[in-house]
């Protein structure tokens, strides 16, 4: 940057605009050398030559419409070109999206068995619960027996043994025998 500014022959007699143009030119030149010029990226993967041609036709019709002071014929030609451009873009975009869906479905079918195996391998296993007196039980046989006893008591109790009524206070309900939990 320093070199480019030193190369400039800025005289004190130069007009302010001339000085400014020389300085901005040096800055742009340095930036281009340092960073390079960025190429325009295509808008989307579906945007191809056919889309580009439709856009160019529409742009020419637009310029023509402006030059002819928006006459009815030039405006109609522009509207028609714009409609055709949108149709092409919509068709190409939909075709691209359908191709992407098909590709993903193919990949999904190839890997479906691996995904299913991963799902089958994961099983949540609860290996602890609380006994009637609140102790933690870790042995599978003891856990199964505790659940068996709980459901036996729950399903085989008489009306008098059922425990608290619905109307009873919540505090009293917590004092009764509860289901085995962690």
Image (spheres, rainbow, N blue to C red):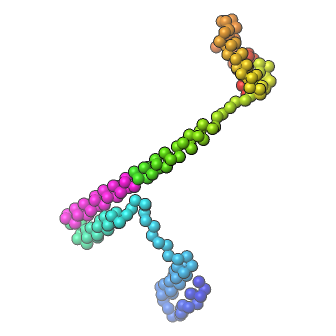
Residue 109 seen in the figure: yes
- Residue 25: x and y in percent read 50, 83
Q: Main secondary structure of the magenta part?
A: helix
Q: Which residue lies furthest to the left in this view?
A: 73
Residue 119 in the figure: left or right of residue 172? left
- Residue 109: x and y in percent read 49, 45
Queried whether the magenta region covers residue 34, the answer comes back as no
**Image quadrant containing the N terminus:** bottom right
| 154 lies above or below 71 | above
- Residue 176: x and y in percent read 73, 15
Q: Nearer the viewer, residue 65 or 10?
A: 65
| 31 lies above or below 141 | below
| 158 lies above or below 20 | above
Q: Residue at x 24, y 69 (%)?
A: 69
Residue 43 in the figure: left or right of residue 129? left
Q: Residue at x 66, y 9 (%)?
A: 156
Q: What stretch is highlighted in magenta?
A: 72-97
Residue 7 in the figure: left or right of residue 151? left
Q: Residue at x 73, y 19 (%)?
A: 145
Residue 52 image-quadrant placement: bottom left
Residue 27 seen in the figure: no
Q: Which residue is drawn at 27% across and 67% down?
A: 61
């Amino acid at each position: 940057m320093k070199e480019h500014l030193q190369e400039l022959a800025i005289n004190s007699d130069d007009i302010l605009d001339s000085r400014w143009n020389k300085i901005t030119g040096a800055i742009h030149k340095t930036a281009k050398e340092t960073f390079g010029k960025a190429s325009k990226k295509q808008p989307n993967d579906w945007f191809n030559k056919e889309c580009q041609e439709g856009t160019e036709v529409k742009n020419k019709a637009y310029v023509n419409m402006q030059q002819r002071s928006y006459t009815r014929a030039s405006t109609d030609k522009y509207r028609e070109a714009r409609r055709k451009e949108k149709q092409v873009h919509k068709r190409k975009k939909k075709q691209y999206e359908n191709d992407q869906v098909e590709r993903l479905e193919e990949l999904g079918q190839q890997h479906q068995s691996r995904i299913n195996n991963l799902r089958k391998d994961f099983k949540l296993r609860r290996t602890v619960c609380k006994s009637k007196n609140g102790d933690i039980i870790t042995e599978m046989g003891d856990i199964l027996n505790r659940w068996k006893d709980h459901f036996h008591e729950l399903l085989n109790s008489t009306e008098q043994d059922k425990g608290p009524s619905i109307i009873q206070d919540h505090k009293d309900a917590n004092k009764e025998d509860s289901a085995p939990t962690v």
